[in-house]
Amino acid sequence: MRIALTRPEGQNEELGSRLRALGHEIVVRPLIAIEPLGDEPIDLGAYDWLIVTSVNAARELRRRGRGEPRRVAAIGRVTADALGGADLLPEVSTQDGLLAALPRPAGRVLFAGAEGARRLLIDELGADFVPLYRTRSLQPHMPLDVELTVLASPSAARSLAALGLSGPAVSIGPETTAAARAGGIDVVEEASPHDLDGLVAAVRRATS
């Protein structure tokens, strides 16, 4: 099957390799680009918890972070690895899952993520928020013979919908699924867990 991978440039290699090993033909068509928001140092040392919910945020923190928070919570293993490790990984790789797993009281919390990120963690924890990057929608040419598209973020789902394409697609998690279906995209499988392994399993189910 011919499958389109849509994560930002340079972030499709591992998934592509694993899907090729299953016999699929891979087409890389990034639907979003990542734009860092500044170069100023970010003081992490004053926080009891640092919360990171994406690989892109983790990479920016490795570049701009100064000092060490007492503890780090990451939304999934890949994000934790990009940051150099984490003290807490929730069983469910969503903001809701992370919120449920975080010990209370959490103390002083910093949530570092994308501009316009969902505010659940900010509002529930009274967290400070630092926007590290924004996503910019891309409109690549999508070959007509693509049989399945993999969506790994709500932003990518919205970009696909803007191209006038409706699926079928595999989604990384509930927020991405909701954004895709709101744009008329036919989500045939959702990853569980909401990570790389889950995406591979979801593609297996979608193509079996």
Image (tube, helix red, strand yellow):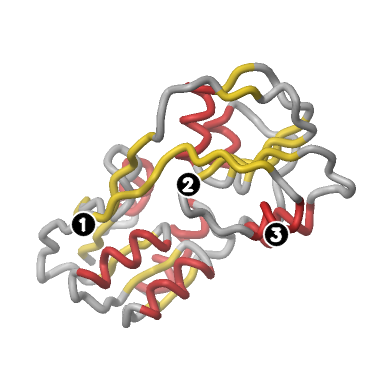
Say which residue label 3 marks: 97
Say which residue label 1 marks: 25
- The tag earlier along the polypeptide, 2 or 3, is 3
Across and down, in percent, residue 193 comes to 59, 60
What kind of residue is marked 3? Gly
Locate the C terminus by quadrant.
bottom left
- Label 2 close to label 1 by CB (< 8 Å): no
Across and down, in percent, residue 63 comes to 48, 22
Q: Quadrant of the rendered structure where residue 45 is?
A: top right
Q: Residue at x 70, y 41 (%)?
A: 73
Question: Counting other residues with Cα less than 10 Å from the Cα at mark 3, is it few (<14), some (14-19), or many (20 or more)?
Answer: some
Nearest the viewer among 189 and 162 is: 162
Locate the N terminus by quadrant.
bottom left
Residue 36's disc number: none
**Left or right of residue 178, residue 2 in this image:** left
168 lies above or below 39: below
Residue 114's disc number: 2
Per the model, the C-alpha gap separating discs 2 and 3 is: 18 Å
